[in-house]
Amino acid sequence: MIRVASALAALALAGCGQDRAQRPAATTPAATATPQSSAKLPRPPCREGIEGCASTSGTMAFVERVDPDGDGDLHVVVTDRSGVTLTGLTAIDVAKELRPRRDPRVGEHAAAMGPVEQGSHGQSQIQALVFRTRR
């Protein structure tokens, strides 16, 4: 359990990868908070033309609300059978523009889609172009 907590903390602190200017821009605002429901969110499908695209859906195991580098993005880690970052876990970097009005909490559901990029500590993470949450 301590190893899992340490891995989650390392993933969240790793946070940012490339500069925002190097990332593909989201074509539509996609962050939404939906009414409370126990149903999982479906994985958003990858769009054509997004190289190295991945999607995820799962329960949030870690949420970093305050970004250490100050660019205002949100970092979350979700449990996901086909984990992008580690077996069973996917880290998601959510740009400031896609942040939901209410920050999500551990235990809520999240779904994301975007290119897989390398974070600042070498981890693979989804740079969200679509990000949805559900309580």
Image (cartoon, grey):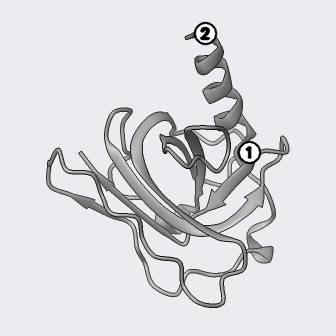
Q: Residues within 10 Å of mark 1 (few under 14, many from 20)?
A: few
Q: Residues within 10 Å of mark 2 (few under 14, many from 20)?
A: few
Point out the tag, 2 or 1, that comes first from the N-terminus. 2
The answer to which image quadrant residue 96 occupies is bottom right
Relative to 100, residue 88 above or below: above
Q: Nearer the viewer, residue 121 or 95?
A: 121
Describe the element under mark 1 as helix, strand or loop: loop
Residue under circle 2? Answer: 2
The answer to which image quadrant residue 51 occupies is bottom right
Q: Nearer the viewer, residue 57 or 9?
A: 57
114 with respect to 36 (left or right): right
Q: Nearer the viewer, residue 94 or 81?
A: 81
Q: Where is residue 15? Give x, y as percent.
A: 70, 45
Kind of residue indicated by mark 1: Asp
Residue lying furthest top: 2
Q: Are marks 2 and 1 in contact (CB under 8 Å)?
A: no
Q: Residue at x 83, y 46 (%)?
A: 120
Q: Where is residue 118? Give x, y as percent.
A: 80, 55
Describe the element under mark 2 as helix, strand or loop: helix
Residue under circle 1? Answer: 69
Q: Residue at x 76, y 61 (%)?
A: 117
Q: Nearer the viewer, residue 47 or 65?
A: 47
